[in-house]
Amino acid sequence: MKQILYIFLYLNIYTLFHQGIFAQQLYLKFEAEKTISQSLRDSLASENSFVDYLSLKKEVDTTAVKLQRFGYLQANLEQLSKLNDSTYLATYYFGKKFNYIKVYYDTSSFSKKELQQISEEVTDNYFILNFETAELALQKLNAIQTETGNAFARLRLQNIEIQNNYLSAQLGTEGNVTRTLDSIVIKGYDKFPRSYLKYFAGIRKGKPFSKKKLLLQNAIIDNLGFAKSTKAPEVLFREETTTAYFYLEKQNNNLFDGILGFATDETTQRLQLNGYINLELNNNLNFGEQFIINYKADGDEQQNFRAKVTMPYLLKSPFGVGLELKIFKRDSTFVTTEQMAQVSYQLNPVSTVYAGYKGYESSNLLDEALAGSAIEDYQSKFAIVGGSVVLRQESALFPKKTEILLQTEIGERTRLDISENQTRATLLINHIFNLNSNNAVYLQNSTSSLFSDTYLTNELFRFGGINSIRGFNENSIDASLFSVLNTEYRYILDQGLYLHSIIDLGYFENSILAVKEKLYSFGIGLGLQTKGGLLRFNVANGNSENQEFRFSNTKIHLSLTSKF
């Protein structure tokens, strides 16, 4: 038994010793009936040394296939010979090189615009492909067919014929059955408002199936705020039906931000309410409804109240309604009430138009008229028409990539039993230029104008503050026309923290005071996603064109928006 063990041990030692002494690298050389250019030689030879004969032989066989892809369709291996103990010579026959393929196609399968994505030469009945890129081009065409609903389509070249220095072929399609989305199933959030699928995300039955589009639509739902996908959508293909499954869960999306304080008025000895409240209730009834209350009071200076209700997709239609009430009071000078009712219609997932009514009523609170104040009681009635375009992106901090809003109000103002035609117009445009995953530039322009023969102070636009031009007090500037450009350079540290610059430029006109002035502000800010909510901190200094820089003009804007 011991002798057998020794023999076995000796055999293993001998085998290891023999392999270590005699194992060596094998090398491969190429030759053909014509001169092989260095560029072609480099393209063919992925390796030139091998650990054994099997790997060398595999490379030899692969090279023949590569030659055919380069246009040498007649290429084949003629001989593999051994030059010495470590070097082999592969002799190939290249044959004639074909430069391109002329592919004839059916215009009902592909448009010229689609074919121009893979070919620089496209006619009404054929297109040209280079041999080197033909395989990748056909793969891309196959992907295009998949996106248009042919989920199981496969392309192939048939009726191949050899011409002088090129091939001609017919583009054929197998399994060319267009798939449409026949059924939509939601798992997890059974009470999800389905109108958002159809009108907000654009997911509709009967449309051609596209996996890529389905993923983009799922990302749009993710940005709703009150719903979140738990995993990617899935598709079930049956013989005659296609069903998409969305996996969603409801998210709390009510927002609150506020600070309130109480003080006693020194003159009237009455209790004053100071501070602000921002309350936003979203989708608590599972209709996608929204209820907003904003209140801000700066002691005796001004008070601002806003309440808004929005009900989208009434009776599962693209129509929605909105009601809004605003009350603005400036110290003991005037109070203005604004009422709005509108009906909206969603044209497509990114575009909405609306029309409605807006009324203004303002009262002069002064016991005696002040010279040059131009404050009087009045009533205004306007028909409003507008539209908006919103393009979204996958970002928790900045879900809107582009936004365009245009609104026009046409009506009349009545004061002292005298009516006067007026027009009000507002344009808002903003866009995020994403430079890379960490850097972005944000631009926004907001412009409003009041067209009238005469003007009152209490009907002018009011701007200034964190939501218009930063570095100025809220609603402290009266204007018959104003335009503000907000710019930010954003550096995103992670998904919950970003820093940004503040450079704002403004221009306004006050036709009552015959004032035309330019404004500017600059500063820095940050946003931080905490457990309590989104914390925003801005520091900005605002000045007018003819005003010297004053550090005392610096304003600090701080807000913490909590979800519940």
Image (cartoon, rainbow, N blue to C red):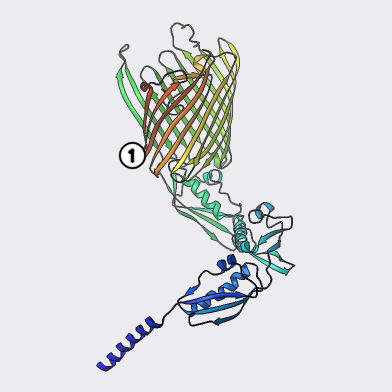
60 vs 242, nearest the viewer: 60
**Residue 418 against residue 183 in the figure, above or below:** above
Residue depicted at 33% across the width and 19% down the height? 272
Q: Position of residue 18 (x, y in %)?
A: 37, 85
Residue 26 in percent (x, y) is at 48, 77
From the viewer's side, name the closer residue of 165 and 455: 165
Quick one: quadrant of the N terminus? bottom left
Secondary structure at badge 1 equals loop
Q: Quarter of the image holding residue 405?
A: top right
Identify the residue at horizontal 47%, vertical 33% (top origin): 487
Quarter occupied by residue 14: bottom left
User: In this view of the protein, which residue sits in the foreground, 200 or 25?
Assistant: 25
Query: Would residue 556 be seen by someone viewing this image from the given angle?
Result: yes
Relative to 113, does residue 353 appear above or below in the rendering? above
Give the quarter of the figure containing the C terminus: top left
Q: Callout 1, which amino acid?
A: Gly
Residue 154 seen from this side: no
Residue at image location 62% in from the left, 67% down from the top = 70
Front-lying residue, 99 or 85: 85
In percent of width and height, residue 556 lies at: 36, 27
Seen from this angle, which residue lies furthest left?
A: 2
Q: Which residue is mark 1?
A: 532
Q: How would you rate the neighbour count of disc 1 (Cα within 10 Å): few for under 14, some for 14-19, many for 20 or more?
A: few
**Residue 202 x/y as whole percent:** 56, 46
Total numbered labels = 1
* The quarter of the displayed image where residue 128 is located: bottom right
